[in-house]
Amino acid sequence: FTYLKYFYVISFVLIIIGSVVIGFFLRSMMVDGLELAIKRDNVSLAQGFINTVWRAPAASYAAPSPTGAAPAAQFGQLASNFTRQLTTVRFAVYSYQTKLLFTSNNQSLQNSDGTLIAASGTNPAYSGQIASRVMDDVTLSGAQPVSITALQSFFPIPNPAYNRASPMCANLVAGAAITNPVCQPTQGVIEIITDVSEQWRRLDMIQLTSTGSIIGIFIVLISILMFTTRRAEAIIAKQHELNLELTAHAASAEAQNHDKSQFLANISHELRTPLNAIIGFSEIIKKEALDNLSSQHQEYVTDIHNSGKHLLSLINDILDFSKAEAGKLELDHVETDISKLILNSMRLVIPRAEEAQVTLLEDLPQDHIVCKTDGKKLKQVLLNLLSNAVKFTPAGGEVKVSAWEQLLDNKVCIQVKDTGIGIAAKDIAKVMTPFGQVDSKLSRRYEGTGLGLPLSKKFVEIMGGEFLIESEVDKGTTITLKFAGIEKDTGIRLKPQS
């Protein structure tokens, strides 16, 4: 954003220079067009004068008249009639000796420096060429002098008797040639002065308008860009402050989470010792003193023992999750027979499945699948998944465990699929969070803390695997685990190059 400020200044200077250049270029083009148009009209006017007025008395004005003033008066009358309807400032005719023969306006014209504007013997028109120029700030004399902008054009009147190669003109020097009509290329010069003040003002206005429009458009665009930039800068600054706040909150939450995990780990350690004592003593009572107790007391002892084991299992889950969160979970990666591990896990869940009237099925290949992983943690994952599947599958449903190898990407896949109540898509994220549960008619068949799926996913990810879940309400849930397989020797050998 700092560099944008320099960009604004530099671009503003460049656009002013560019707009001025464009304005001057546009004006020069229009000036050239205006001069060409007026010159074209004046050429037609001069040619018309030559054809209608000049031809008859031309011989009389090429040399001094022997008959006096009659031809001059006749010429003046014809010229006056021709120029009566013209809107030019001045229409004047000069002889080849620069003598003024006729003028439609006797008012004098002066340049800005005060010199009179008149034909000259050095004018290119006397050599047979058309000449023109724009005169700015020209003063037209009179009762009230007027300052105008005028276009002055000179048109030569060709001399049909001109023959520079004749013997009469061969030995004449340049200064003497003008006194001999035969050696002079022109019989005279027509001067036409046209007032272009109004057109000139329009050109100036067009130039100013075009230059101002370009600058104005640029200023509007720059203003919009500056407004957008400032707004974006404010948004980014606010976003930066928000990011800093979120970072601080995230660090605080991380610290609190770490403290919570540490607290749970400490509490779990403290609870395991008395729970082991309760479980141990209740088991001794069951084995040695159960026969001496009444049936009601026997039920009490059994409930104490089962509740203690269940509570110890929950505490172990919390402790494992706390260790996993803190990154202190120890793994022992060894080659594990996945097929045997699945069968052992299913065997432990069979009593619960029979009680819930759920059928357990297995789909395993004949060859045993071997994978390098932590067998104890993977077994705990399988027990959690199988227990959840049985728990949330209605009576008459089934839970199927499959395993296979993906040879293309060398993956070992384990899949637990049930026909239970399923999970809505919006609730999957909830059940995958620690202690997250979704209420349903079967959700309380077995007690739990909601750590089964999150803990299983955590274990799988720590072991370097993938945890994938797909579910649909009333159609069941499918959970797939993927682990890296062991590189196998294909027996293919490349022949060494000689």
Image: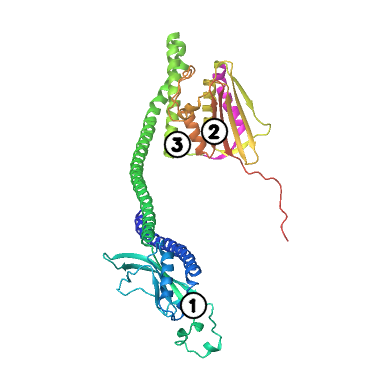
Q: Nearer the viewer, residue 372 or 68?
A: 68
In the rendered structure, which amino acid carries the disc numbered 3? Answer: Ala
In the rendered structure, which amino acid carries the disc numbered 1? Answer: Ala
Q: Residue 51 placed where, x, y %?
A: 51, 68
Instruction: Please tell me which residue is depicted at 61% across the width and 37% down the height of the picture.
Output: 412
In the rendered structure, which amino acid carries the disc numbered 2? Answer: Leu
Question: Do tag 1 and tag 2 residues touch (Cβ < 8 Å)?
Answer: no
Marks 2 and 3, how far apart at CA: 19 Å
Q: How dense is the environment of label 2, judged by Cα within 10 Å: few (below 14), some, or many (20 and up)?
A: few
Instruction: Please tell me which residue is depicted at 42% across the width and 32% down the height of the picture.
Output: 319
Q: Quadrant of residue 7?
A: bottom left
Instruction: Provide the major secondary structure of the magenta segment.
Output: helix
| SS at mark 1 in the image | helix
Q: Is residue 352 found inside the magenta-colored segment of the image?
A: yes
Magenta-colored span: 332-354
Q: How dense is the environment of label 3, judged by Cα within 10 Å: few (below 14), some, or many (20 and up)?
A: some
Q: Residue 314 placed where, x, y %?
A: 44, 26
Marks 1 and 3, how far apart at CA: 124 Å
Q: Quadrant of residue 200?
A: bottom left
Q: Quadrant of residue 231?
A: top left
Dot 2 corresponds to which residue? 468
| SS at mark 3 in the image | helix
Q: Comparing marks 1 and 3, which lies closer to the viewer?
A: 1
Dot 3 corresponds to which residue? 324
Colouring: rainbow
Q: Comparing marks 2 and 3, which lies closer to the viewer?
A: 2
Q: Earlier in the sequence, mark 2 or mark 3?
A: 3
Dot 1 corresponds to which residue? 59
Q: Nearer the viewer, residue 371 or 226?
A: 226
Instruction: Work out whether residue 337 can be spotted.
Output: no
Q: Is residue 281 left or right of residue 498?
A: left
